[in-house]
Each structure stands twice: as C-alpha cells, then as structure tokens.
Amino acid sequence: MAGKVKKPGKRGRKPAKIDLKAKLERSRQSARECRARKKLRYQYLEELVSSKERAICALREELEMYKQWCSAMDQGKIPSEIKALLTGDEQKISRKLFVELKLNHHSSE
C-alpha cells in the first residue's frame, strides 16, 4: 500500500505578530461589549425589581384599607366607600379611594 510520508514540522500558516495584536484587540472589544451588555441587563433587572416593589407597596396599602373596612363592618359601621358602592356612586368612590391611596402612599415614604 502506497501512502504519503508525513513531513516533520507544523502545518498551516504561522501567525504573524500583527494577527496576534488584532486578536488581542478583538478580544478587548468583545470584553467591552460583554461588560456593556451586562450593565444593561443589570439596569433592566434593577428597574424591574423597583417596579415590582412599588406594586407590592400599593397592594399592601390596598389590603390594609380592606382590613380597615372589615374591622369597621365588624363594629357595625359601614364605611362611606362601601355606602357609595351600594348606592352606585362609583365616581365618588373612585376619587375618594384614589385620594386615600395617594395619602397613604405619601405617608409611608
């Protein structure tokens, strides 16, 4: 069987110093881009957490308001907000709830 004889030495081209410098520069650029993407990702996540924390605060305030209503009804009192709901005065209740939630929000800050 006739086969090719391997020649000693390296195959392919030998990288020049210019190629090494270019490779290092590409690596640095890639690292800069990676850091920039990471920074944007962290900013996005921080904004998302902040948004969720605000939503949680608003829900806690709403829950507290409902607890107060229940407590008042347990004492035989009907909160004005519930009276407004029962009489169908929805605009009045909406404005009052909005003002109350806003006041509660400012006082908790």
Image (tube, rainbow, N blue to C red):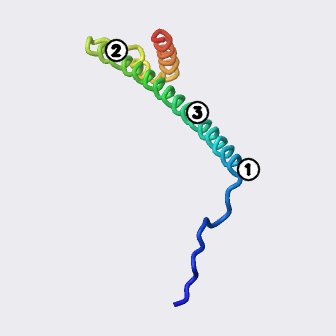
- Nearer the N terminus, badge 1 or badge 2? 1
Q: Is 80 placed left or right of 7 in the picture? A: left
Which residue of the protein is positioned furthest toward the front in this rendering? 8
Of 106 and 41, which appears nearest the observer? 41
The answer to whether the residues at label 1 and label 3 have Cβ atoms under 8 Å apart is: no
Q: Is 75 placed left or right of 1 in the picture? A: left
SS state under label 1: helix
Image location (x, y in percent) of residue 28: 65, 41
Say what amino acid the circle numbered 3 marks. Lys
- Nearer the N terminus, badge 3 or badge 2? 3
Say what amino acid the circle numbered 2 marks. Gln
Q: Residue at x 34, y 14 (%)?
A: 68
Q: Residue at x 48, y 14 (%)?
A: 105
According to the image, label 3 marks what residue? 39
In the rendered view, would you say 34 is above or below 13? above
In the rendered view, would you say 41 is above or below 103? below
According to the image, label 2 marks what residue? 68
Residue at mark 1 to residue at mark 3: CA–CA distance:
32 Å
Image location (x, y in percent) of residue 19: 70, 52
- Nearer the N terminus, badge 1 or badge 3? 1
At label 3, counting other C-alpha atoms closer than 10 Å, the crowd grade (few under 14, some 14-19, many 20 or more) is few
Q: Is 18 placed left or right of 41 in the picture? A: right
